[in-house]
Image (cartoon, rainbow, N blue to C red):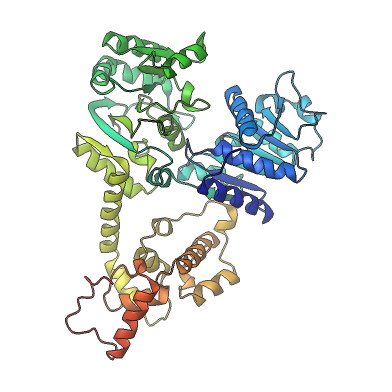
Amino acid sequence: MFQLRPYQAEAKQAILAAWDEGYRKTLLVLPTGCGKTVVFSSVTEDQVKKGHRVLIMAHRGELLDQAADKLREASGLDSVLEKAESSSLGSFLPVTVGSVQSLAQEKRLARFPNDYFQDIIVDEAHHCLSDSYRRVLDHFPAANILGVTATPDRGDMKNLGEFFDSKAYEYSMTEAIRQGYLCPIKAQMIPLELDIGSVGVSNGDFAVGEIGCALEPYLEQIAREMANYCRGRKTVVFLPLIATSQKFCAMLNDVGLNAAEVNGNSEGRSEVLADFEAGRYDVLCNSMLLTEGWDCPAVDCIVILRPTKVRSLYQQMVGRGMRLSPGKDHLLLLDFLWMTARHDLCRPSALVSKDAAIAQKMDERLRKDDGVYDLIESEEEAERDVLAEREAALARELAEMRNRKRKLVDPLQYALSIAAEDLTSYVPTFAWEMAPPSEKQIAFLEKRGIFADSVRNAGLASLLIDRLKRRQDEGLATPKQIRCLERYGFRQVGTWQFDDASALISRLANNSWRLPYGMNAAAYRP
């Protein structure tokens, strides 16, 4: 049996709580390599104990096999397969692992009573927006639904928010790296100017055929560059087309790297993958085959020759190399200077920052630096600079806020004071988040010192309330303390402990509400 990691246990409880609170369709957001299958296997185990039938649904055979194996390994539960000639109807086993292609067939689906499954888990939840998934999900209208996905960008969440009611839990790639559950990423900029400015868009992403043509003139040079960086490493290369993948594989062998290629039509694909894992090949080329359902923790170098606008896809590709493995201290990500005027091209910064301004600051720095850079360190530096720029840009507005004849703190001022990026850049996703704040939320915020008139929706109100409660539990300064001290010129009071802020306010009061002689408020730290 698996011992859940702390964040996995939190995720499980959050999912069950969301269902109990009436959010029937909820999301779990975990980066690749953080054990999403372990989490939903544990959720499945709990639901089976309640007497529920559970359906785990995926779109590829590898994902179905992976889910069944992990379920058995993590919980001891066996499952029955719903695919091709195999059916779960009449089985005594309470868990079904099902192929959406099979389940979505009208005659097959009609055989299941509408209440047959009480819980449905959708692996790779972004697929559930398709007609085939919706047909199956709509057939079981009372079932609890859990969608599992890697960290999505704002566009993905907007689409997912049209179907799901809530996001039960999110664990970021940055948190996973800092807490030691994923390996650090170091990116190396390769000074090749690959022009994709004229490449068209198909189905919301760069057209793979046109990407293949744009890439063609650079393949030999890229192969030579890889010979410099990839020797002694276990490397996976993602390319746009099978023909391009096969051609590039031959070029890598020509420059002295021992490379193999796999695609959806490969004979002996499993043998090639096994040989790569065993170390018989240095490099594995593929045309987007290995983004899902394949794990090789020893991979320590990723080369993306398939530029994308889709953040979740980009993370899936890089995620193939982020798992921990003995002797592996980081993942090397080779990044190319794709030339395009579009700002939606995913670059390494997209892995660790959802904030567009911070990502742009990272990109600007990294273009000027031809060395290897640690993504987490780069993100922290960029975040400091962007927050400083925002504080400067908002100085007049905040000065006005501080001087207003009101006893409450503006939420923008509060968010900046506690350096809460998620509050300053918050955009509602789900329908309930877009609704106005409730009277109960407004009353809570005003009681805690927040000027609720500036809180435009229930989602931001909920986020503020959660943050206020968490900060109280951690013994941090309150909004009223922040407002009081920042009016005297003290800065970053939101990072202070409650007791330190209280002591300084008492000191000011005892000094007739004047700064003590010689005290520099802007530079003061408790």
**267 on left or right of 415:** right
Which residue sits furthest left?
518
The image shows residue 318 at horizontal and vertical percentages of 40, 32
> What residue do we see at 26% from left, 11% from top?
255
> What residue do we see at 30% from left, 36% from top?
186
Q: Quadrant of the N terminus?
A: top right
Query: Could you tell me how many numbered marks the image carries?
Result: 0
Nearest the viewer among 416 and 73 is 73
Q: Is residue 142 visible?
A: no
**347 on left or right of 224:** right
The image shows residue 215 at horizontal and vertical percentages of 32, 20
Nearest the viewer among 318 and 203 is 318
> What residue do we see at 29% from left, 85% from top?
508
**323 on left or right of 233:** right
Whether residue 182 is situated above or below residue 69 in the rendered picture: below
Quarter of the view holding residue 59: top right
Q: Quadrant of the C terminus?
A: bottom left
The image shows residue 279 at horizontal and vertical percentages of 39, 16
Q: Is residue 188 visible?
A: yes
> What residue do we see at 53% from left, 59% from top?
459
The image shows residue 369 at horizontal and vertical percentages of 19, 37
Nearest the viewer among 74 and 464 is 74
Quarter of the view holding residue 198: top left
**21 on left or right of 190:** right
Whether residue 122 is situated above or below residue 483 in the rendered picture: above
